[in-house]
Image (cartoon, rainbow, N blue to C red):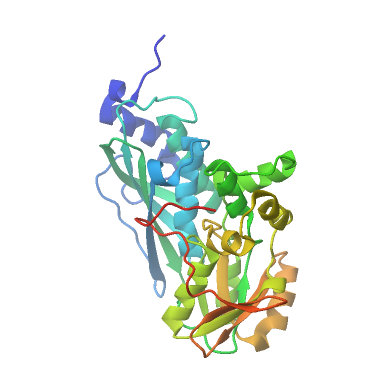
Amino acid sequence: MVAKTVSDIGERGLIHIISELLGGLGNDILTGEDDAVAIKLKDPSTLVINTDMLVSTTDVPPQMTLFQAARKAVVMTVSDILVKGANPKWAVVALGISGNLPVEGDRGFKGLISGLKAGFLEYGVQYLGGDLNETKETVISCTVFGDAPNGVIPRSGAKPGDLLICTGEMGKTGCGFSILVNNKEPNDLEEDQRKQFIDTILIPKTPINHSRILLENNWVTASCDSSDGILATIREICKSSNVGAILEWNSLPIAKGVIEFCQNTNQNPIDLVFNAGEEFFHIFTIPKIKLSAIQEHFKKNVLSFYVIGKITEQKKILLRTEDTEINLDEQTGYEHFRKKREN
């Protein structure tokens, strides 16, 4: 039996699959396959909205299935909602797919929709509806709406003397991209370590509770998620806040095996750590006086974070190593329409 493609069953058949797989996650105001959605908000909540687009030729390495790509589209959109201190609630998704796309399997249409469902369930998001069109490549445009009952955390609130903190270990995605995209990896890389690096690309995660706790306790001055690279994220906070930063190389939470990976593949660890992108962890600035309280509260909630530097009046981003001080202003993170990522 010849496997069906999406052109065999048409738009209505595809919409039926979407309704069948995602219908249980829908809203309770306009149900079914209605062309519009409605959301009722309770005062004094703030509605926070973010849209991200994932394109197969630029964002999806060959090793990634459509299930994984669709879940990633949810993660990358939800991350921007969470880092503002909001709770992700609802989503609409616009899909562009080829008529030759298979229907079945993790690399087919059902895999794509199942990946969206997995992401929505993981982060407690209701699927409201969306749009579907025929394109030459797969495009997933995901919009998530969040509820922020306590206000939102801006990028622009960092002040000189604030500490810079992040929620995850650095360098894993750089190693993952090196393996998947550039075919660079040490010959003696252990399989468990290799899988850990690759999984940060294929199965990314974003922290759920850090921003909410910091906002509820008035412990945070600025925040941004690290999707375009750690350095680019810090630069956005500094630019928006009209400040600079000093980072301490020896204080950075560089993941196990990253330095050795760079040494064995002849790559600059500073570039790989700061500019790879798609970590999807969160970077905050906090008043130094609040550090002890945050450490104690996070420990009770089994949450971790790392102090990586401090905010300065001087509008430069500097990196201190044991031997020298490096100006990072010339380095860049990942940016669409520029030269492809190289690690």
Classify the position of the N terminus by image quarter. Answer: top left
Nearer to the camera, 214 or 202: 202
Residue at 50% x, 35% y: name it. Answer: 65
Looking at the picture, does residue 77 appear above or below residue 217?
A: above
267 sits to left or right of 78 = right
Residue 258 at x, y percent in the picture: 69, 55
Residue 109 appears in the picture as rendered: yes
Query: Toward which corner of the image does residue 96 lie, by quadrant?
Result: top left
Q: Position of residue 171 (x, y in %)?
A: 63, 58
Q: Is residue 69 left or right of residue 38?
A: right
Q: Reply above or below: 95 against 312.
A: above
Residue 242's place in the image compared with 112, above or below, is below
Q: Residue at x 51, y 82 (%)?
A: 316
Q: Percent x, y for residue 269? A: 63, 61
Residue 160 or 338: which is nearer the viewer? Answer: 338
Q: Nearer the viewer, residue 86 or 275?
A: 275
Any part of residue 156 in sight: no
> Across the whole image, how many numbered discs are drawn on residues?
0
Q: Residue at x 53, y 74 (%)?
A: 328
Which residue corresponds to the image point at 43% horizontal and 37% vertical from the top-left? 113
Please tell me in which quadrant of the rendered image residue 8 appears: top left
Q: Nearer the viewer, residue 174 or 127?
A: 174
Q: Residue 124: image x %, image y %?
A: 52, 53
Above or below 68: residue 272:
below
